[in-house]
Every structure is written in C-alpha cells, then in structure tokens.
Image (cartoon, rainbow, N blue to C red):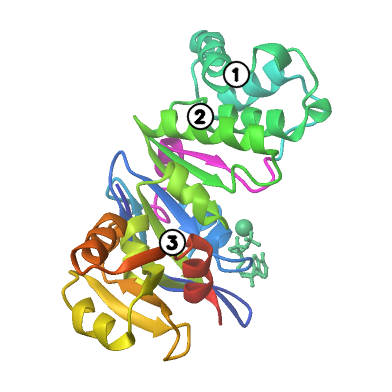
Amino acid sequence: MIHVEHLHKSFGSVHAVDDVSFEVSRGEVVGLLGPNGAGKTTTMRVITGYLSANEGLVSVDGVPVSEDGMETRQKIGYLPENSPLYLDMEVYEFLSYIARLRNVSAKKINRRIIEMIEICGLKSVIGRQAGKLSKGYRQRVGLAAAMIHKPPILILDEPTSGLDPNQIYEIRELIKNIGQERTVILSTHIMQEVEATCSRALIINSGKLVAHGTIDELLNRSGAHINYTVSIKATRRQIEERVTLLNNVNFGEWLTDELSEHQRLTLRCSDRTNHSEEIFNWAVKNAFILTELTHETTSLESVFRELTQN
Ligand SMILES: Nc1ncnc2c1ncn2[C@@H]1O[C@H](COP(=O)(O)OP(=O)(O)OP(=O)(O)O)[C@@H](O)[C@H]1O
Ligand SMILES: [Mg+2]
C-alpha cells in the first residue's frame, strides 16, 4: 500500500533521510521509531506529499506521490507534529472547515463530524474553542481532522507526545481501533508505544533504516537474552558437568568465588521463552539445593539504545 524505495532527502548538507526503503501493507499499523532528528517527520512529510524527495520513489497504492499529489493526499490522513489547529475556531467549525478542504461533499459533512465525535470522544468539547482545549483533546481533534475524509491510510507524527498517562492510554486504544480497518504509520521515540499499538516497527537513526521487524524480532535480532541468576549449593565442577543438560540455556558467569559453598552464577537463554521451571526441575533432578532463581529480560529501551547510539 505504501512503498518507499531508496528515499533521500537533504536540507543543505544535512541528510535527513538517507537511502530509506520499506513497504507497508494494507491494514498494518507500523511504528516509525527513532531518536530526535532521526528523520521520522521528514519521511512522513515526503509520504504525505508536503515535501518532495531528492531521490527515490514513494508511492501510495501504486501512484507515485510526487506525480499526483492530490490523488495520494486524498488517500492519506495526516496528523502533523504538535497537531496544529486553528485556535480561534470552535471544534465543530474547524472540523467542518477541514472536511470542505478535503472535498467531503456538503451534505455528508455533518454526518462525518458526528462519526468523528463518536470515534474520537469529542462530545464534551465540540462547541469549544480549539485554542482552549487541553493537549489531549487537541490531539483528538487533530486525529478527527486527519480522519474526516475517511482516508484508508493514516500517518500520525508522535500522536501521544506530551500527553499524560491516561491520555496516552486513550489515544493508543483509539489508534488500535482505527488500525483494525486502516493502514497506519505512527512515529514515536518510545519502544513501548510500538509494542502497545503496532504490528511492526521501522527503526531509523541519522536518516538510515537500522532495523525493522516485530518487537520480538527486534529483541531477538539485537541478541537480547533472558538472563537468570541462580544460587546453588554445589561445587563449580558439579554445576559445570550438569549445566550442559539444559536446553537453550547456557552458562553465563560465576558471581561468587570458586570455593564458596553456594555458587551464584548467571545463565543465559538463547531463545525468548521462560526457562524458570526447567531450571528448577534440573536442579531437583541433580539434587542441587537451589536457593535463588531470578530472571531479567533485556529491556526494550536497551535494544533501542543499542540500535540508535551513534
Ligand atoms: N525544514 C528543515 N530545514 C532544515 N533542516 C531540517 C528541516 N526539517 C528537518 N531538518 C533536519 O533534518 C533532520 C531530521 O529531522 P526530522 O524532523 O525528520 O527528525 P525527527 O526524527 O522527526 O525528530 P524528532 O523526534 O525530534 O521529531 C534533523 O537534523 C533536522 O534538523
Ligand atoms: Mg519529528
């Protein structure tokens, strides 16, 4: 549905987007993830036709964006960064204005606004001035404006930035619902956001695509492991002899000195399943007294840092 091939966009000497290629299929919710200045907004602005690429091809439903701006724009709903609204307009008036800009026929405008009030939860603010709304409600109005012409594709630039945790939750739920029938690309700095709303993530750093895949694939790809820490009343030699019997669990390192009565050590898993029960049973079977068994997962943040640190 969205096809981006060898996209380059520079501002003077700054390579904002540097040879980025990806595809987004119909019905996918894809997260564009990256640190500040990575090129997320620039990529989105090229896809939406607000900026032209220096090189490369971007097409929406087979239509190149640069050649037919109007046709592709009609298919896309865009929520720009910091959802700019006309602050002195009332919400209803604003949505009606945007609907006219988006070629919604006059007789359908009222019905579309009513639908948006329902979908975006705008009932309590519909008669209020946009400039007097809280940030969360402005964001909802921005989403309503992006969807007013029923575009099959939504491009949302940091839809939850600056919101409180309740509003973040609500907007994420909203995006999940929207994503059931539409194709969505959203940008974020937050790995958890992708986990909560997206089926897949594209990670960009300094204009380059550094990784893509589902959260699980990204965790695996970066060599993420579950680490266990165990304390066992046994000698090192006994443990060394038996540790090879565990499947997909390997010795990590010793945490106590060689002669200590309890050996404390780490074990690393080569897959992402939970092996606690297996480790417990292994200890029992070998008559090892297990006095500690804890595990920690490599965090999403550390994966993000690993992939985006320059
Ligand atoms: N209009 C512009 N003129 C000059 N440089 C620009 C312009 N827009 C973006 N840039 C530069 O391009 C790079 C990518 O910026 P972009 O806004 O795409 O990043 P981003 O990933 O959206 O960052 P953020 O998370 O801070 O929103 C940055 O170095 C930025 O300074
Ligand atoms: Mg941005």
Residue in the picture at 62% in, 68% down: 37
Q: Residue 59's x, y, as percent?
A: 34, 54
Q: Which residue is mark 2?
A: 174
Q: Nearer the viewer, residue 38 or 310?
A: 310
Q: Nearer the viewer, residue 71 or 21?
A: 21
Q: Which residue is mark 3?
A: 294
Q: Earlier in the sequence, mark 2 or mark 3?
A: 2
Q: Which mark is residue 121?
A: 1
Q: Is residue 202 at all visible to an observer of this figure? A: yes
Label 2 to label 3: alpha-carbon separation: 36 Å
Going by the numbered disc 2, the residue's amino acid type is Leu
Region rendered in magenta: 65-83
**Is residue 73 positioned above or below 116 on the image?**
below
- Name the image quarter holding residue 310: bottom right
- Is 226 covered by the magenta stretch? no
Dots 1 and 2: beta carbons under 8 Å?
yes
Name the side, left or right, on which 2 lies relative to 113: left
Other-residue count near label 1 (Cα within 10 Å), few / some / many at <14 / 14–19 / ≥20: some
Going by the numbered disc 1, the residue's amino acid type is Gly
